[in-house]
Amino acid sequence: MKPAERLSRLPGYPLAELPARKRQLLAQGVDVIDLGAGDADYPPPAEVVDALRRAAGETALSKYGFQQGNPEFRRAAVEWMRRRFGLTFDPVTEMLPLIGSKEGLSHLPFAVLNPGDLAVVPEPGYQAYLGGTVLSGGTPLLYPLTPRTRYLVELAELDEETLKRVRLVYLNYPNNPTAAVAPREYLERTVELCRRHSIVLAYDNPYCDLTFDGYRAPSIFEIPGAREVAVEFFSLSKSFSMTGWRLGWAAADRSFITALTRVKSYVDTGPWLAVQQAGAYALDHAERLMAPNVAELARRRDAGIAALREAGFTCESPLATMYLWVPLPREIASADFGRLALEEEGVVVMPGSAFGAGGEGFFRIALTVGAERLTEAVRRLGQVLRSARAA
């Protein structure tokens, strides 16, 4: 078989090879500490698991959900947005259940891009943005996230002719992998620019509740005018440690929801209704259920930052997410550092270059193990740093 040409424009997925190599090392007796994927080691809330057990026994919830989904989940999602952000959305016309926010993010370009249209894709960034753009026939315009712009996508830096061709921009704050947050004034001028140039703003917001030190992450819809241009994506994966459950939603003006619904009608039949029922329970009790996870992540963040500085790294303490974005000395390539960390010390980290060329010079740590194991992992990474400098 000769694959479609568009597949040649997709880079290798950054996590594709790690599970197999990790299994090999474990089989050899290596004590592997995995700080790679953003998949925390603590379980989903027991109450939500019980809610899923109950829902799984209801025959009606094992039927096709299609895009209408479970009305209880639609209700709970918009009610959570009202409590969390003070926003009102229609649960029928302005919200759409997703099989995890990833599929919605990658399907959106099929709804809004014509062949050759530009989509601004942050680099480093989540690969679903690039994948959806390429597979839909759009053209990605990679924007490097660097300390120069505080890891913000500054659309005003693009010339007018380029902006005329941009139809879609992906923003993700709090950000993966850099853990950057977006000031309100940045969001205000970005929304205004998108309105002037008729650019759809895909706002990926799965980390909005994983925040520390009093920081509160906003919804894009708190910004005046955002409903004219934005689609916001939420997920239960990170806040509730439900990554494998594959449940999220999109919120937007009905015109965007109608277009995305039409795309999804041809490619899936929506999340399992029983999972949506359990998700509704999680959202109805979100404030109480998420609090222990956020407190644990804060402990891990503090332990990780202290250990990194002790081991010879420099790293800012982030206000949000479950990641640490760690700079490397100029002479050490991130892929080489990641390989040495795994092979010599049994520590899995994500090289910055795995998120695109714009991530070179950094590596990402996911706060997916307890503080004691995290400290041990960083001690080992310090050994790798010293060895690489001495080579």
Image (cartoon, grey):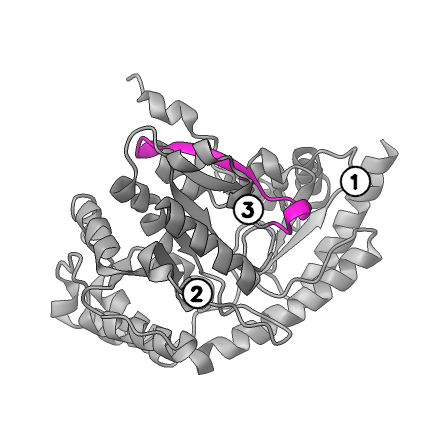
Q: What stretch is highlighted in magenta?
A: 135-151
Q: In which quarter of the image is the C terminus?
A: top right
Residue visible at 28% across and 17% down in the picture: 1
User: Does label 2 or label 3 sit earlier along the sequence?
Assistant: 3
Packing grade of label 2 (10 A; few <14, some 14-19, many >=20) is: some
User: Dot 3 surroundings within 10 Å: few (below 14), some, or many (20 or more)?
Assistant: some
Q: What residue is rendered at 84% in x and 42% in y?
A: 386
Residue 38 falls inside the magenta stretch: no
Image quadrant where residue 279 sits? bottom left
Q: In this view, does 364 lie above or below 343?
A: below
Q: Is residue 235 above or below residue 103?
A: below
Callout 3: helix, strand or loop?
Answer: loop
- Report which residue position mark 1 lands on: 329
Q: Is mark 2 on a helix, strand or loop?
A: loop
Q: Please tell me the numbered disc located at residue 250.
A: none
The residue wearing badge 2 is: 223
Residue type beneath disc 2: Ile
Say whether residue 180 is left or right of residue 70. right
**Looking at the image, is 77 positioned above or below residue 388?**
below
Q: Where is residue 43 in the image (x, y as percent from the top left)?
A: 47, 68
Residue 385 lies, in percent from the top left, at 80, 43
Residues at marks 1 and 3 touching, judged by CB atoms closer than 8 Å: no
**Which one is earlier in the sequence, the residue at label 1 or at label 3?**
3
Give the SS element for disc 1: loop
* In the image, residue 143 lies in the stretch drawn in magenta: yes
Q: Where is residue 238 in the image (x, y as percent from the top left)?
A: 47, 63
Residue shown at the point (54%, 52%) measured from the top left = 176
Q: Which amino acid type is shown beneath numbered disc 1? A: Pro
